[in-house]
Image: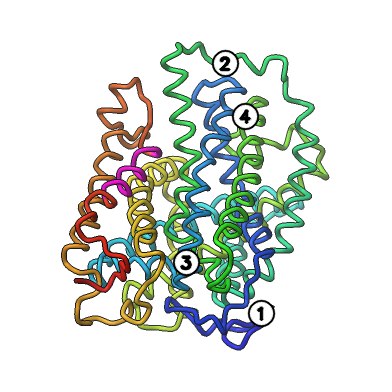
Amino acid sequence: MSGGSNPVFGVEARGFEHIPDAERNMTLPQIAPLWLATNMNVLSIVLGCVGITLGLNLWWALAACVVGNLPYAYLGFASIGTVRAGLPVTTLTRAIFGIRGNFPNAFFGWVSSLAYEVIGTVLGVYALLALMKVLGWHGSATAGKLLATLILLMFSGGVAMLGHATMIFLQRFFAVILGVVLFVVLVRTCGQVDWSHGGMPHTPLTTKTVVAAFMTACGLIASQPIGFLFNGPDWVRYLPTATSGRQIFYRVFLWTLLPSIALTAMGAMWATLGDMSDPVAGLKPFIPGWLFVIYAFAVVGGAMASNIPVFYSSGLSLQSLGLNVRRWTATAVDVLVSTAIVIYILFVEDFTTALNDFVALLLVWVGPYGGVWMCDGVLRRWVYPTGAVHRSGVSPPLGAPDRRLLGWISLSAGMAVGILTMRSPLYDGPIAMALGGMDLNWVLGFLVGGGSYYVLSTPLRRPSWDGVGS
């Protein structure tokens, strides 16, 4: 893969602006390794453990792994929009909310990317520390944490600074290596799961409590596919404009759904073996020492592979926020901020608490946001004023006042429903509690946000729906 503006191991020239067709050098077969590598990370395993820790039996937990990953269908559909527009999400949504009006969404997108970077890096640091200990590291714990952080962030951030083509090129190697290692670990551990007692819950649960726990487990797992709706579609925008929408959808959907089901299911099965609060060290008693070393290497590699595209989109979000620098410079700024937060988490804050709080709050915003911008894209047939989204003061104004208002009303409606129906360690919504602790935020936020926008926009609909304003 090579190209004048998007070369492998060269600096990608484009940033958050439109990608002309002449410069689009991605192909459909590259979708599979991109998403395989991105999703083969230990976060999926951690989320898969949740059903067991909530008291579900193994079969219910495995069912949650399937149902919770189905929202990857949203991501597959959203990817059609960024290919047609040639724009990242934080840029194309200016057509709804206006340039200044979209600032909060771009900011939330950047903060969410930052949080994912921190989560991936911290999990990778723990894996690298465990690996360093096995390999005979005798330095201080502080030095070990700082060295591990530096290794992970320099590689992930460095690749992201180079840009899209380098990311796509390297993900194919991550996909093959990580896939083989995790498959071997899965085969070795499957035999240790007591399948004959898989139907036994860890704690007695009533039918109502089982359903509530199941929906909560689904919601936590769904946080990953729904959480990609503000940046994941960015990564395929180098496909040619005329690429089959059906092919885009199926390839993105299948190559995100299948590995995620496999990894979350691994987490559920491993959680029946013992304490998996540390998904790296927790697995050590159940596999041979030589395989544990390879597994720890794979976890570190998975952290890098999953962070590279997130760092890439973070730079685009900072540009959308108004940081007037080149894309690679914006990415470098993001890497520095991530480094500071990772160090704080490692030495000051409890990581588990931070992870649970982040997942809960992210879904409240990103689900309705995805519903609104995807509904708008369908109404306008994914046709955007690609020049106007970069200019202020265009006339008529980008995202006419009535459309901006409808966008924010719909987004607010979805977020309000999310707050009322969420279940998390940070806050339990009153409707969720009235239903026995059942989390419906992951289901209703997207549907209410998108549905409200569709209904409210009826008076504005025109055959063209060009998004420039009335």
Instruction: Point out the stretch of residues depicted in magenta.
Output: 442-452
Q: Which residue is mark 1?
A: 8
What amino acid is labelled 4 in the image?
A: Ala
Q: Of the two numbered discs 3 and 1 on the same chain, state the one appearing first in sequence.
A: 1
* SS state under label 4: helix
Q: Which residue is mark 2?
A: 201
Q: Which residue is mark 4?
A: 271
Residue 439 location (% of width, % of height): 38, 31
What amino acid is labelled 1 in the image?
A: Val
Q: CA distance from mark 3 to mark 4?
A: 38 Å
What amino acid is labelled 2 in the image?
A: Pro
Mark 1 vs mark 2: in front: 1
Q: Of the two numbered discs 3 and 4 on the same chain, state the one appearing first in sequence.
A: 3
Q: Nearer the viewer, residue 406 or 460?
A: 460
What amino acid is labelled 3 in the image?
A: Thr
Q: Of the two numbered discs 4 and 2 on the same chain, state the one appearing first in sequence.
A: 2
* SS state under label 2: loop
Q: CA distance from mark 1 to mark 2?
A: 50 Å
- Which quadrant, please, contains the C terminus? bottom left
- Which residue is pictured at 53% across the width and 73% down the height? 241
Q: Which residue is mark 3?
A: 82
Q: CA distance from mark 4 to mark 2?
A: 12 Å
Residue 437 against residue 296 in the figure, above or below = above
Residue 445 against residue 190 in the figure, above or below = below
- Which residue is pictured at 66% across the width and 31% down the height? 270
Q: Nearer the viewer, residue 211 or 355?
A: 211
Q: Quadrant of residue 190?
A: top right
Residue 213 location (% of width, % of height): 45, 24
Q: CA distance from mark 3 to mark 1?
A: 22 Å
Residue 4 location (% of width, % of height): 61, 88
